[in-house]
Image (tube, grey):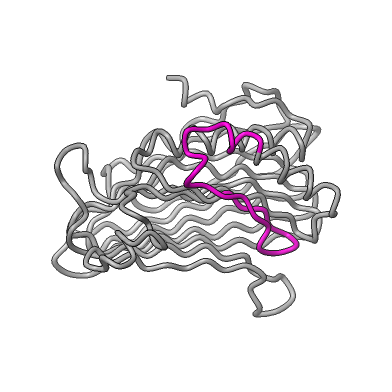
Amino acid sequence: MTWHAQLALNYRATAGKTLLDFSHDGPLRILQSLYPEGDAICQNVLVHPPGGVAGGDGLDIKVHVKEGAHALVTTPGATRFYKTSGDAAIQRTVIKMEDGARLEWLPLENIAYNGCLAENRLQLQLAPTAELIGWDITALGLPAADQPFERGAFTQHVELLSPSSSHSPWLERGCIAADDTRLLQSPIGLAGHTCLATLFFIAGRAISMPAKELFLSKSREIAQAHALSATCGITSPHAQVIVLRVLAHHTEQAMDLCKQVRGVWRELAWGLPNIPPRIWAM
């Protein structure tokens, strides 16, 4: 049996409060809106009751953040892409943001189980004054449980769309095949690491040079002091984008560095403290 599910999240700002309207079809849900930082920031937890994504499953998530709204979306646990002997499993997320909107897109890690055939696709479209902090974290197999990623393939796709043309200002797409030992083991590839993470700050228009230099310098201070200093890097591949890339042997290490840098970006961009989503503390 395959699962096909759709979830649409629509955030709007009314009298200084961010409110959520949503609709769903199939096994995708959103939990109660939380406001631990006050009415301006709406926190939500996205849940998938089946617990994982198998061959032939399709999950479609659409997020629309309207002018002046600030939303934070996370998950209660990892998204698991299970072994399949047939069709691929696909998760598609499309995010659209209007002027003055802010979004923190912080789902916990994806786990590519041995034998999976899966694609995780994220597309972003931002109006000129919209801003987003998000991440994509993937673990290959379950090496700690003696279940390495030896068969299958996992495709990651993160794309910033231009509102005015078919051109993509920033696109990262990679297919990780379990039998590609050159990619997985080479020192110019993953060098044996089984977790890869990408944290990104994206603006709807070019980030000013002083702001960009501040983002990079503050982020690099954290990275250089971290245990993963030798396997991470922070760059600006496009005028609208700042990216932290991390390789790790353990998801917890990669997540820790991403959380620290996310907190610094939050303060620099929006003047907000490094407060984690409430569910992370449960």
The answer to whether 275 is drawn above or below residue 150 in the figure is: above
Residue at 47% in and 26% down: 280
Q: Where is residue 244 drawn, in percent x and y?
A: 58, 49
Q: Where is residue 96 drawn, in percent x and y?
A: 64, 58
Q: Is residue 64 magenta?
A: no
**Nearer the observer, 114 or 48:** 114
Q: Where is residue 139 drawn, in percent x and y?
A: 33, 47
Residue at 35% in and 63% down: 90
Left or right: where does residue 32 sit relative to residue 27? right
The quadrant in which the N terminus is found is bottom left
Q: Where is residue 43 drawn, in percent x and y?
A: 58, 33
Magenta residues, start to end:
221-244
Left or right: where does residue 123 sit relative to residue 13? left
The quadrant in which the C terminus is found is top left
Residue at 21% in and 67% down: 179
The answer to whether 162 is drawn above or below residue 44 in the figure is: below
**Nearer the observer, 207 or 133:** 207
Q: Is residue 233 magenta?
A: yes
Left or right: where does residue 181 sit relative to residue 234? left
Among the 4 quarters of the image, the one containing residue 176: bottom left
Residue at 74% in and 75% down: 164
The answer to whether 191 is drawn above or below residue 263 in the figure is: below
